[in-house]
Image (cartoon, rainbow, N blue to C red):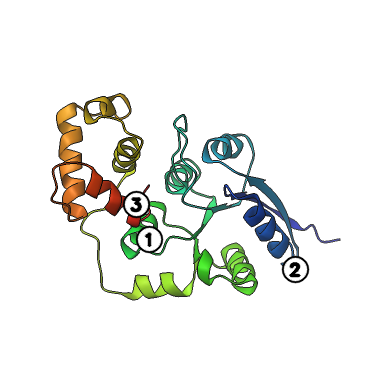
Amino acid sequence: MINKKIINILMVDDHYMILEGYKNVLSGLELENVVTNFHTIDNCDDAWEMINTSKFDIIFLDINFTPKNDAKILSGEDLGIKIKKSFPEVKIVVLTTLENSFRLQNIFNNVEPDGFLLKGETTSKNLIRCLESVIENPPYYGPKISKLLRSEMKLKYTLDEVDRIILFQLSIGTKTKDITDHVHLSLRAVENRKKKLKEIFDVFESGNKELLERARECGYI
């Protein structure tokens, strides 16, 4: 008897119906000598705890999660970065509703996913094909992601976790002077980061309103 390889898959998304849909579709994948086990979870903090206590081969990540003030991991992007750093052997598939090119390139540069799909253009067949490719011969990118990667556009600056924390804290009303409690930076360094973020988003107003509007349009908050 041939022993079948077991592939443990974790799907992280804060929408229950989406998780169930993924699970139902992907359960239809049939590969010779491979058995897939699916697990689901709806937030990044609990997902990170599971990843540290259980062995997963592939992790499907949404990017935007409903913001919670006590969350330690703010987005699927931040979770993906932590996974790549601590568990480089784990394959990551990003599925997102985001379509802003700047945002998508940031995710690609930071996470370097083995699969990358936009939810709006993904069919059941695409999803199954993606999983099959990630198991056998990664990477697999959806049509828009492939087109984006073929373009000659290069990012001059990639937003990191600190930038995203600053934007999140500003979005929930934290004063600039108090953001130092959430990042290991001086007040001057935080102010310099804000200045750089305004340059990136082409914001010229002195306040935070326009910066937050542009960051929200791009899917950062």
- Residue hosting label 1: 104
- Which image quarter: residue 180? top left
Which of the numbered marks, if any, corresponds to residue 216? 3
* Horizontal side of residue 88 vs 217, given as left or right: right
**Cα–Cα span, label 3 and label 1:** 14 Å
Instruction: Kindly identify the amino acid type of the residue bearing the numbered disc 3.
Output: Arg
Q: Nearer the viewer, mark 3 or mark 1?
A: 3
Element class at badge 1? helix
Q: Position of residue 150 (x, y in %)?
A: 34, 75
Check the image and report above or below for 85 versus 154: above
Q: Residue at x 20, y 58 (%)?
A: 156
Instruction: Kindly identify the amino acid type of the residue bearing the numbered disc 1.
Output: Leu
- Which image quarter: residue 102? bottom left
- Circle 1 Cα neighbour tier, 10 Å, few/some/many (<14 / 14–19 / ≥20): many
Q: Residue at x 64, y 38 (%)?
A: 54
Q: Which of 191 and 108 lies nearest the eye of the viewer? A: 191
Q: Nearer the viewer, mark 2 or mark 1?
A: 1
Q: Which of 44 and 98 lies nearest the eye of the viewer? A: 98
- Circle 3 Cα neighbour tier, 10 Å, few/some/many (<14 / 14–19 / ≥20): some
- Residue hosting label 2: 32
Which of the numbered marks, if any, corresponds to residue 140? none
Q: Which of 71 and 28 lies nearest the eye of the viewer? A: 71
Check the image and report above or below for 30 versus 10: below
* Horizontal side of residue 77 vs 180, given as left or right: right
2 or 1: tag closer to the N-terminus: 2
